[in-house]
Amino acid sequence: MNQLEQKIIEKIQREGPIIFETFMEMALYEPGLGYYTSDKTGIGRAGDYYTSPHLHPAFG
């Protein structure tokens, strides 16, 4: 289990059920852990996805 999962579980245990909006906010924006706030590479072959320019120079 990663740190973000643990934080979400702890919040649910502490406060009870959470709404989807709260879950998504944590998953995307939790400082240092969320998808958009972590140091993880998001674009390129090493990331979650890559676009046409990453495939071949002719695309961009």
Image: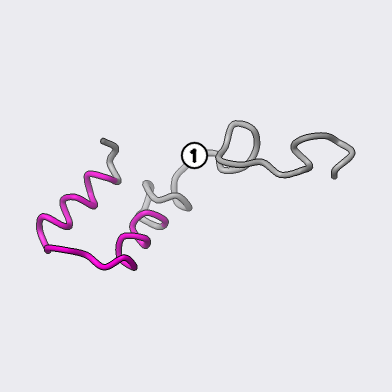
What residue is at 77 percent from the left and 43 percent from the top? 52
Q: How many marks?
A: 1
Q: Answer left or right for 40 relative to 44.
A: left
**What range is drawn magenta here?**
5-28
- Could you say where residue 3 lies in the image, as x and y percent from the top left? 27, 41
Task: Check the image and report above or below for 53 versus 34.
Answer: above
Q: For the C terminus, give its image quadrant.
A: top right
- Kind of element beneath mark 1: loop
- Give the labeled residue for mark 1: 40
Q: Nearer the viewer, residue 16 or 38?
A: 16
Q: Name the foreground residue: 41 vs 53.
A: 53
| Residue at 78%, 42% in the rendered image | 53
- Which image quarter: residue 25? bottom left
Q: Is residue 32 above or below residue 47?
A: below
The residue lying at 38 percent from left, 47 percent from top is 32
Q: Would you identify the image quadrant in which residue 6 lies?
A: top left
Q: Residues within 10 Å of mark 1 (few under 14, many from 20)?
A: some
Identify which residue is drawn at 42% across, 56% down.
28
Furthest-right residue in view? 58
